[in-house]
Image (cartoon, helix red, strand yellow):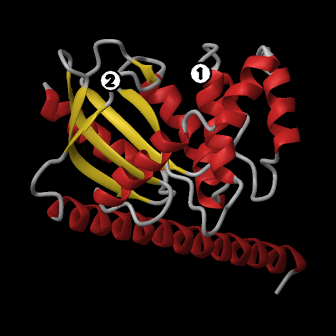
Amino acid sequence: MSRAGSIALAAVAVLLVAGVAGYLKLSSDIDTLRESQRQLTEELAGMRKSPIVDLAGVPWRGGRDAIVTLLEYSDYACPFCIKHFQQTLPQLEEQYIRPGRIRYAFRDNPIDQLHPQAIRAHEAARCAGDQDRYWEMHGRLFTGPGTHGDDALIAHAQAVGLALPDFQTCLNAGRYTTDIRRTSAEASSLGANGTPAFFLGLRDPATDQVRLMRAITGAQPFEVFAQAIEAMLKQAQ
C-alpha cells in the first residue's frame, strides 16, 4: 500500500474512533436525562395532595405577573447547590427568569449536620434584605464549607454596601434564625431530604400562595428544568 493510502486509512480510523466516542457520550447523556425524568415522574406521583406554600413577603425574581413559580430549597455551603448556582441557574436566568416567564424564589435549608456555619450565611442574606440588598448578598454566599465565618460575612456586607452597624446588630441578634428553621422544616415536610431541592407550582396572584405541582431533586441538568417548566407553562395557559 502506498504511503498516501496508509495516511488515508489512518485518518479514517481517527474519524471512526472520534465518532464512536461522540456516540457513547451522547448515549450517556440520554441515559442521564432518562434517569432524571424517571426520578421526576416518581416525585410527581408522590405529590398527590398538591401542597400549598405561602410566599408572601419572600424575595423573588422574574415576572411580576408570572404564574409559574420555581422554588429552590438550598444550602449556601452545599457543593451540589454551588454546582447548580454556577452551572444551571445562569441558563434558567437567561431563558426563564429575566424574560419574566416564571418567578423564582430561594428558600433557606441549611443542613447543620454537614455545614454548621451555613445558617449564619442564610441569616446574613436575610439581614441584607433589611437594607434591600438580599440578592446582592445572596449571590456572594455560595461558597464551600468553612467559608461563612463572621469576618467573611462582614466583608461581603461591606462589598455590597450595607450599613455595617445595622447588619451586625441583625446578625448578632439572630433575628431570622427562627424563620430559617421554619423554612427548613417546611422543606422536610415537602419531602426535601437533601439539597438542592426544587418545586414548580402555580401562584395565586391575589395571595402569593403557590400550589406545588412538580418536584426536581438535586443539581440536575438544565434540560430537566426546561422540560418541567415548559410543561408547567402550558398547564398555566
The image shows residue 114, relative to residue 50, as above or below, that is below
Residue at the disc numbered 2: 56
Of 121 and 20, which appears nearest the observer? Answer: 121
Q: Amino acid at mark 1?
A: Gly
Disc 2 secondary structure class: loop
Task: Describe residue 201's horizontal placement relative to residue 27 as left or right.
Answer: left
Query: Residue 147: horizontal and vertical position, in percent?
Result: 81, 51
Residue sitting at 68 percent across and 69 percent down?
Answer: 15
Query: Residue 75: horizontal and vertical position, in percent?
Result: 58, 52
Residue at the disc numbered 1: 129
Sequence-wise first label, 1 or 2:
2
The image quadrant of residue 177 is top right
Q: CA distance from mark 1 to mark 2?
A: 15 Å
Q: Amino acid at mark 2?
A: Ala
Neighbour class for label 1 at 10 Å: few (<14), some, many (≥20)? Answer: some
Residue sitting at 58 percent across and 75 percent down?
Answer: 20
Query: Residue 106: horizontal and vertical position, in percent?
Result: 48, 37
Q: Quadrant of the N terminus?
A: bottom right
